[in-house]
Image (cartoon, rainbow, N blue to C red):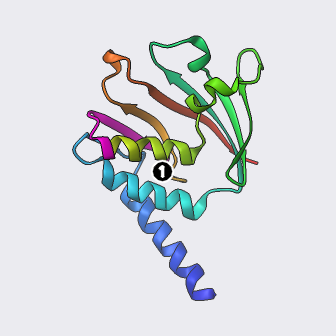
Amino acid sequence: MPGHSLTSRIASLALVFVLGGGACRSATEPQLDLVAARALWTSLAPAAYEITILRTCECLPEMSGPVTVVVRNGIVEWRHYVQSGATVANAYADAFPTVSGLFSLLDEAARNGTQPVSVQFDPRLGYPVHIVIGDPATDSPVYDVSAFRAL
């Protein structure tokens, strides 16, 4: 449908405008950015991509990373530690989510009222690039996403 394509492009451009240059909001308004960023990601996400996730926390080294995650059609193809090349054990896989999983973390924080929540989104594609959920001083994880590449 030609009209649908134009509508999608207009919506995407509007969301880019809303997100500005890597939007970062305070804990009082993360939902606005979350909705806009998710819509942008949904409209522009490639079917296959690779990201690197560094999870900072007071936890086992296996739960920190950095880890490269390869996703095809919404399914994780593999997760490898960047430094060693070793495969992430299933027990630690949830520590390194897909982009959809990162959005789910933000949804859960919003439902639970976890404060503070700080998030920055990629201005082009809308995926989260930096997430702080809770208070890092109390062992809450911080997620940093880098090296995004469409496959």
Coordinates of residue 139 in the picture (x, y in percent): 38, 17
Q: Quadrant of the N terminus?
A: bottom right
Q: Secondary structure at mark 1?
A: loop
Q: Amino acid at mark 1?
A: Pro
Q: Is residue 74 left or right of residue 55?
A: right
Instruction: Examine the rendered structure and indicate whether residue 113 appears above or below residue 80.
Output: below
Q: Quadrant of residue 27?
A: top left
Coordinates of residue 117 in the picture (x, y in percent): 32, 36
Q: Which residues are magenta?
A: 111-124
Q: Nearer the viewer, residue 108 or 4?
A: 108
Instruction: Examine the rendered structure and indicate whether residue 134 appears above or below residue 62.
Output: below
- The total number of labels drawn is 1
Q: Is residue 109 magenta?
A: no
Q: Is residue 114 magenta?
A: yes
Coordinates of residue 21 in the picture (x, y in percent): 41, 48
Q: Residue at x 58, y 32 (%)?
A: 94
Coordinates of residue 84 in the picture (x, y in percent): 75, 15
Q: Quadrant of residue 78?
A: top right
Q: Nearer the viewer, residue 102 or 150?
A: 102
Q: Is residue 77 left or right of residue 139?
A: right
Q: Which residue is mark 1?
A: 123
Instruction: Examine the rendered structure and indicate whether residue 113 appears above or below residue 134.
Output: below
Q: Residue furthest front?
A: 91
Q: Residue at x 45, y 35 (%)?
A: 130
Q: Residue at x 62, y 22 (%)?
A: 66
Q: Residue at x 54, y 56 (%)?
A: 41
